[in-house]
Image: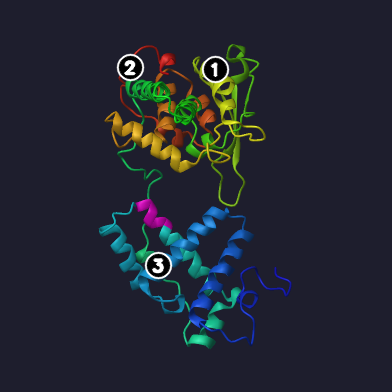
Amino acid sequence: MGSNGSAPGAARLQLVDGVPLLRPAEQVFDAMLDGWRNQQLARNLAASTVEGRRATVRAFATAANAFPWQWAPQMLDEWLGDLRSIRHVKRTTIRSYQDAVRSFCQYVTDPAYDWATQCEARFGSHPIQVVHEWNTAVHVQENEADAAKRAFTLRELHTFFAYCDEQVDRIRSFGRKGWLPAFRDATLFKTAYAYGLRRNETRMLDATDFGRNPRGTEFGEYGVCYVRHGKAKKGSPPKRRSVLTVFGWTTDVLDEWFTEGRPLFGVDGNPAAWPSERGHRVGNQRLNSRFVAYRDALGLDAGLDFHSFRRSYVTHLIEAGHDARFVQEQVGHEHASTTSIYTNSRQLHQTGEFSQVA
């Protein structure tokens, strides 16, 4: 509650009574968005989630050319219809937009926040809920991922990693500085596959996030990867898990990077496993662009993306005979059904031994 007993985001906390506004409509809308931000932060939602929702609501207001107290369901229908038919926005994206607008409308129509009274007094109208059952996409199945997205075959994975290594050698032979970032990214890609990690889980690893496994002494200092930035549930901190090393080549790859590559970045005081040449830690956009450049240069399927490393990890372990429960624990899935979605039900085109893929 606020200092005067109001809920976080209440109108009286955003607008000062008796003070005239120079641009009433714009300023009240901005105050609504600020109050909604406070309300969401009070619910422990991530700042990135909050800002993404605010951007969605602003985009809808711009497309509708109207303020919340002027909105109608038809405006939302037209906006989303254009996004689907003209921009070909994905179903999951449409649903996220609907959720953002619905949440905002719930906030501004809730009597606890007093926005309806403020709008009625200032503009002679008040906000309504414009997202209803009849104009909302129904979530009827657990997995709605693009059917084109898939795992690598072992041959594709071997080709991709070989190309990563070739680029490091090629750039270095020309005497260019870019060989070190290429070396970093090649190792990062291999690590994402070696432990079945998501993109941000991989990017956020620190040099200290590897340790010994007393039951896997053959892996030395890299027997376990401690994931500290796993996918979080709504309103919760990042989920942690420990992933055991299963591929024999992982130790050599990581040891070469941490002893020969990473120190060349000048990492004093920087804990990041994958430092950036311009900042503290390599960014998601850089990883995406590097991955796409390599994939396209090899002529590989556009259905392969960074997350395909994780899909491949699950698929390859299952097909190699690893226990399904072990694989589920490794990737941090709460339900076996989620892990099964990642497993491609097809015969992989294998080249060489499973453990020699890198």
* Viewer-proximal residue among 5 and 142: 5
Q: Main secondary structure of the magenta part?
A: helix
* Viewer-proximal residue among 182 and 299: 182
Residue at the disc numbered 1: 251
Residue drawn 61% across and 59% down? 41
Residue at the disc numbered 3: 60
Q: Which corner quadrant holds the C terminus?
A: top left
Ranked by sequence position, the earlier of labels 1 and 3 is 3
| Residue reaching furthest to the front | 175
Q: Are marks 2 and 3 in contact (CB under 8 Å)?
A: no
Pointer 1 local density, CA inside 10 Å: few below 14, some 14–19, many at least 20: some
Image side of residue 331 versus residue 344, left or right: right
Residue drawn 39% across and 70% down? 62
Residue at the disc numbered 2: 350
- Can residue 150 be seen? no
Whole-percent x, y for residue 63 in the image: 36, 69
Q: Which corner quadrant holds the N terminus?
A: bottom right
Q: At numbered mark 1, what does the secondary structure look like: helix, strand or loop?
A: helix
Q: Do the residues labelled 1 and 3 touch (CB within 8 Å)?
A: no
